[in-house]
Amino acid sequence: MSDLPAKVVQILRVGHKGDGETADGMFVPYTLAGEEVAISTSEDGSYAVEVVKPSPDRVKPTCRHFGTCGACQLQHMAPTVYLDWKREQIIIALAQRGLEDIEVAPTTAIAPGTRRRATLSARRIPDRVVIGFQERGGHFINDMQECPVLHPQLLALVPKLKVALEPELPERGQAELALTLTDTGIDAAFGIPGAKLDREQRARFAIFADRLRFARLTVNEELVHQSSPPLMKWGRGQVALPPASFLQATCEAETVMQAHITADVGKARKVADLFSGCGAFTLPLAEAHGVAAFDSEEGAIAALAQALRGMQGIKPATAERRDLFRRPLLKHELDTFDAVVIDPPRAGARAQVEQLAKSKVARIAAVSCNPATFARDARILVDGGYRLRVVRPIDQFLWSAHVELTAFFERD
């Protein structure tokens, strides 16, 4: 196989997935706007990239794995340019829906070493176990030696897990290790193909979970060890998390979102918290507002309801299991609330937003991790008579192309 002649191209912009884009629509990873790069294409379709003329905005990546590990795309971008790029992705998404001249605040930066949940891949190879994130564009696992994104407590587990899991992983297949740092310790959920979970293996798992001081370990959705319930404290409330619970990626970003939502609901007497999860927003709000929380996850709603029952001196608060994609709150139900908090998954919440657009709800506090679906839903609300007052980017997913945001809508 011989390489074809190199072609020098100009990078015009960085696209929404974090790759540089050329005039003919080619996307080149790890490049910046204004750079000239030489691309050598091989007969098998793969290509190599060499930066011929670097951008003044290019900086030395923080991590030795950058460029191989698929978790980060933008460590080579200067910090101020990087934060501006995240803000720009929201402006572009809104403009594509005809929403222009919207106030988009500067991006709130979140510090490295604060990510409290991650799912790592693990595989047994002939001489050892490799653990890390998958390599970009492939199925190989980047064997993690460092990670400036993960919380130090999670990172410190990696070498210990490599040793502990060596006798437990199958010869073939890939395991997934979900790790969450809670207020009472690590909540670990392992998916291990072919695990027998007989008495002997369960005992081995329990022993190393105790040695690593896990609060809880589940393997293939079976509980094998729990030294204490994994708890999270929000406001005056404390929730016992069910296994595989959704949690914001960093505590710092969550605190920023809670402050935004508290400001946005204002003095509303009654608030609906849609897609509430385990109650990161519900519990603080219940101290000053009547709250009704809704989510489709049975375990999350049960945990939230129990936490609300244990709180003293709060306003009336309820938690109800409801699939808001199939059974959104209807106009007449929404009209009983003064404000709504809505934090849907990446797909957005079109069916629910269509009902909100018909409602009399005065204030909407929105959270989103996808500018494209947020802009689609925002268009529906604006067409229904709401004014989008402000959008606030938050850099929760450090050095990735993902953008978190909060937004405030008010009925015009």
Image: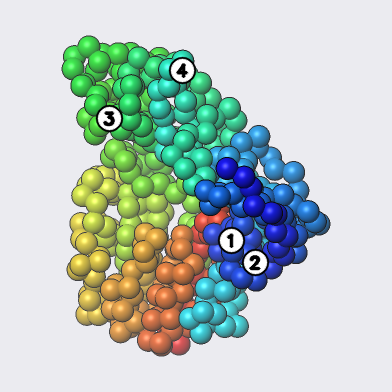
Marks 3 and 2, the one that precedes in the sequence:
2
- Please name the amino acid that badge 4 sits on: Arg
Residue at position x 32%, y 52% from top?
A: 277
- Please name the amino acid that badge 2 sits on: Thr
Residue 55 in percent (x, y) is at 78, 57
Residue 193: image quadrant is top left
Residue 187: image quadrant is top left
User: Alpha-carbon neighbours of circle 4 within 10 Å: few (<14), some, or many (≥20)?
Assistant: few
Residue occupied by mark 2: 22
**How far, Cα to Cα, is label 3 from label 2?**
42 Å
Do labels 1 and 2 touch, CB within 8 Å? yes
Residue 10: image quadrant is bottom right
Residue occupied by mark 4: 128
Q: Dot 2 lies on which element?
A: loop
Residue 247's tag is none
Residue 39 in percent (x, y) is at 67, 54
Residue occupied by mark 1: 27
Residue at position x 52%, y 45% from top?
A: 136
Residue 14 in percent (x, y) is at 63, 63
**How far, Cα to Cα, is label 3 from label 4?**
18 Å
Give the position of the C terminus as an image quadrant: bottom left
**How far, Cα to Cα, is label 4 from label 2?**
41 Å
Q: Quick check: 126 left or right of 328?
A: right
